Image (tube, rainbow, N blue to C red):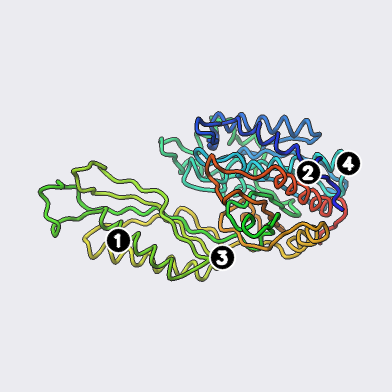
Amino acid sequence: MMRMTMEQASGVTSLLEKLAGFGSTADGGVTRLLYSPSWKDAQSFLEAAMSAAGLETRYDRVGNLFGRLEGKRKEQGVILTGSHIDTVRSGGRYDGAYGIAASLAAVSFLRSTYGEPGRSIEVVSFCEEEGSRFPLAYWGSGNITGAYTTGMSPLIVDPQGITLEHAMQAAGFGREDQPESLREDLAAFVEVHIEQGVILERTGGKVGIVETIAGQRRYVITVKGETNHAGTTPMAMRRDAVAGAAEMIAILERAANRAGEPLVATVGRMKLLPNIPNVIAGTVEFTLDIRHISETLLTGFTDAVIGSFHSVAERRGLELDVQAALHARPAPMDPVLTGKLEKICSDGGIPYRRMMSGAGHDGQMFVNRCPTAMLFVPSKDGISHSPEEYTAAEDLALGVVVLAEMLYDLAYEEILT
């Protein structure tokens, strides 16, 4: 018997609808980039919602927002739960936002029903996870866990030439009088998220219990050749950056198919210069995203592919520049917390499955700092990062119910060792 009913959890849908109004786009999506006006408005809305739920609110130096339910035993650390407020461009209304709304709904219920917990609980709205504005991801959770510091911010620039430092300060953050982001008081982190895949929907699962988040390598690859006339330059005399990049991408796809699941490799963005129909492009820039649950296999595959890129460039007389943008190791979830989630679902008669996450999440930043757990709810047709992103109201509510049960165990009953 779950402590929270589906009806009590149904309010999460209304909160998500309100959040979707901040940064709404004409195509029905949401664009809420780090430190933008819509981002600031959404954080302010959540701050008010946290206060209305009886939580003590505060921001840290980079703009992470926390709502705290104080516990009796402060020395035993904080149970942190939440997700990220930023979106991709024209993304959906559930990615990230659901984790915050679900956490707020669950903690609000626990407070009103059971009062003061033994261990403090904090709902967090991470300032950034997606990497949609600046060329890095997990800025919010990365500062909390020590992976990043604000000292990096002057060196990171968005496509408009605005530094992360300037954007942060313009939004009212980055000041020395604000609390530092690094946390040393965390007893556990629990994140609930939409799956962003089709596995739960196709297998009839209602809850996914994440065992491992895949490691990721992201690169920006720049291929430089020679810009020249498309009509007067013989094929054999060309230093065509597009042709070289195309060969590299074909090598990538063949290698990924040979490697098999669960490895995936993607070229998601490409820029051509000068990008004129009758001119041979002299420069091509493309992104490379490679993921696997094994660090050893991920490293071996990545090194081999980039080595092949260098061989192609040398043979074609091209210059190749490879810039690393992200190196995230595979992140196994805590087996004790994962087991607790499994017992909650089993005892409650909830169809569940253990699974991996191919997508990256804030949870992976916490695995070396505190016990971490993550659960998924289904995504219709597996669509995410799109205005078509959708999860049924009953699935959203069920995720809140399971999360509330987990937080009760950790904050009201359990003393973690």
Q: Earlier in the sequence, mark 2 or mark 3?
A: 2
Q: Earlier in the sequence, mark 4 or mark 2?
A: 2
Q: Earlier in the sequence, mark 1 or mark 3?
A: 1
Amino acid type shown at disc 2? Ala
Nearer to me, 192 or 115: 192
Q: Residue at x 52, y 31 (%)?
A: 25
Q: From the top left corner, tell me how far across and down residue 376 is, in percent.
A: 67, 53
Amino acid type shown at disc 1? Glu
The image's mark for residue 203 is none
Q: CA distance from mark 1 to mark 2?
A: 51 Å
Q: Left of 109 or right of it: where is 182?
A: left
Nearer to me, 202 or 246: 202
Where disc 2 sits, the SS reads helix
- Is 278 above or below relative to 266? above
Q: CA distance from mark 2 to mark 3?
A: 31 Å
Q: Residues within 10 Å of mark 2 (few under 14, many from 20)?
A: many
Nearer to me, 60 or 218: 218
Residue highlighted by disc 4: 113
Residue highlighted by disc 3: 293
Q: Left of 311 or right of it: where is 41?
A: right
Q: From the top left corner, tell me how far across and down residue 224 is, in percent.
A: 26, 53
Residue highlighted by disc 2: 106
Q: Residue at x 46, y 53 (%)?
A: 325
Q: Left of 103 or right of it: where is 39?
A: left
- Is 222 above or below relative to 334? above
